[in-house]
Amino acid sequence: MSGHSKFANIKHKKEKNDAAKGKIFTIIGREIAVAVKEGGPDPNNNFKLATVVAKAKANNMPNDTIERGIKKAAGDVGNVNYEYVTYEGYGPNGIAIIVDALTDNKNRTAANVRSAFTKGQGNIGTPGCVSFMFDKKGQIIIDKEECEMEADDLMMTALDAGAEDFNEEEDSFEVLTDPDSFEEVRKALEDQGIPMMSAEVTMIPQNYVALTDEGAVKSLQRILDLLDDDDDVQAVYHNWDE
């Protein structure tokens, strides 16, 4: 087990909050539509769709809802006009922020994201300006209370399936994979009946930055809250050490 433990980022908080509001199902529904359009309706032959389905299950989306979403997307392929777009920028004190959006109107989304940064004393940067500070990884979070397997057994199961790293926290376990190995590892854990709190390919900061100024904290939180409220925003990653 490594010492890496900083995995409670804004993305997970966003999804937990959204799940309570039902919004996460809408977000995942868009992702299903795009994945089906790009690679077809069979998760076994469409890695992106398989990844979205895994995310849906981790967020407790019912199987029949997932299946309906796939069928609807398959019959509506010509009308799916969402596209992915990523923004990078800085919050107060140089906090690095990456915003992933899925939108049918890039001009609207760009204006909203830029406004969020501006209102929180931050600024949008050029593509690549902060992403080099993050590593793209498959990440699986397992709630200790829901997992009956011992930590060592779980670690060996994950590593044997191809995971790169395994970390234990007070209330959860984290499994990290290469993005290309993510689905294989996730499927191996699923086959063992291991419940996953979240399972997705994400961006993990290489280093974290602490904020001691109360004004900077409030400004950064304003950026994150505004992005959280934007329906086009799928995920937000940052390197703030909360």
Image: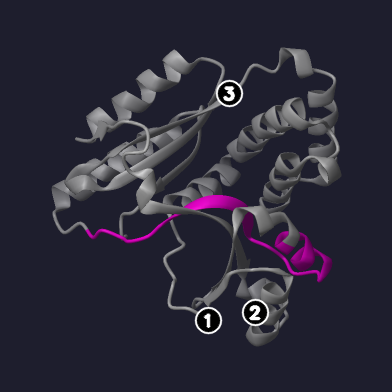
Q: What kind of residue is marked 3?
A: Glu
- The residue that label 2 is drawn on is 155
Residue closer to the observer: 208 or 132: 132
Q: Are marks 2 and 1 in contact (CB under 8 Å)?
A: yes
Query: What range of the chain is rendered magenta?
Result: 185-210
* Relative side of 103 to 72, left or right: left
- Mark 1 element type: loop
- In the rendered image, which quarter contains the C terminus? bottom left
Would you call the spot at circle 2 few (<14 residues within 10 Å), some (14-19), or many (20 or more)? many
- The residue that label 3 is drawn on is 83
* Relative side of 28 to 184, left or right: left
The colour mode here is one colour
Would you call the spot at circle 1 few (<14 residues within 10 Å), some (14-19), or many (20 or more)? few
- The residue that label 1 is drawn on is 1
Q: Position of residue 63 (x, y in %)?
A: 83, 45
The residue that appears at 75% across and 59% down in the rendered structure is: 184
Q: CA distance from mark 3 to mark 1?
A: 38 Å
Determine the image quadrant of residue 48.
top right
Q: CA distance from mark 2 to mark 1?
A: 8 Å
Q: Are marks 2 and 3 in contact (CB under 8 Å)?
A: no
Mark 2 vs 1, N-terminal side: 1
Q: Position of residue 175 (x, y in %)?
A: 60, 68
The residue that appears at 16% across and 52% down in the rendered structure is: 214
Q: What kind of residue is marked 1?
A: Met
The residue that appears at 67% across and 48% down in the rendered structure is: 55
